Image (spheres, rainbow, N blue to C red):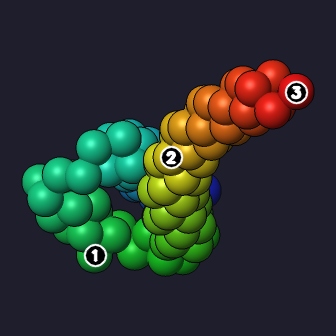
Amino acid sequence: MARTTELQLNMVDSRKETEYMKEQLDALVTAMQLLKNQLEVSDDENDVQLENLQRKWRLEDTGFCSLASTCHTMRDNWSLSMKEMENIEEDLKLAKLKEHKDRNRINALERALEITMLENK
């Protein structure tokens, strides 16, 4: 009888532990979704929810904080790269415009030189 009671207690403990692990896994999945949303669109509500999950479930023990930090760094680097690309595109447009103006000026000077050479013959 004592053995049966011990097994029942172990099963109850096992169920509680399994339920706790399932809740923790659900929290981690929710945190991943919030992180995804946070990376797509900066939203204060996502930030607050994510901070609450991190506090409640100690997500730092799962490596999630490292993942989130890396994702934020990648997002920041991407954003900086996009700004640099926009600057380069603007510089390229200006350079092409200047090249076009310079070509027109060179063509005009060449025509003027040809006319002058013909007049001096």
Mark 1 to mark 2 CA distance (whole Å): 51 Å
SS under mark 1: helix
Q: Tell me the mark number nearer the camera, choosing from 1 and 3.
A: 3
Location of residue 21 in the rendering, given as x and y in whole percent from the top left corner: 48, 53
Location of residue 58 in the rendering, given as x and y in whole percent from the top left corner: 40, 75
Residue located at (28% from left, 75% from top): 55
Residue located at (88% from left, 27% from top): 121
SS under mark 3: loop
Looking at the image, can residue 14 be seen?
Answer: no
Mark 1 and mark 3 in contact? Answer it, CB < 8 Å: no
Seen in the picture, residue 119 relative to 51 is either above or below; the reply is above
What residue sits right under mark 3 in the picture?
121
Looking at this view, name the residue that lies furthest to the front. 121
The numbered dot on residue 28 is none
Q: Which of 47 and 94 is in front in this view?
A: 94
Location of residue 14 in the rendering, given as x and y in whole percent from the top left corner: 52, 52
Residue located at (49% from left, 55% from top): 87
Q: Nearer the viewer, residue 111 or 89?
A: 111
What residue sits right under mark 2 in the picture?
94
What residue sits right under mark 1 in the picture?
55
Instruction: Locate residue 63 relative to residue 75 in the image: left or right.
Output: right
Identify the mark nearer the N-term, 1 or 3. Answer: 1
User: Of the residues shown, which amino acid type is indicated by label 3?
Assistant: Lys
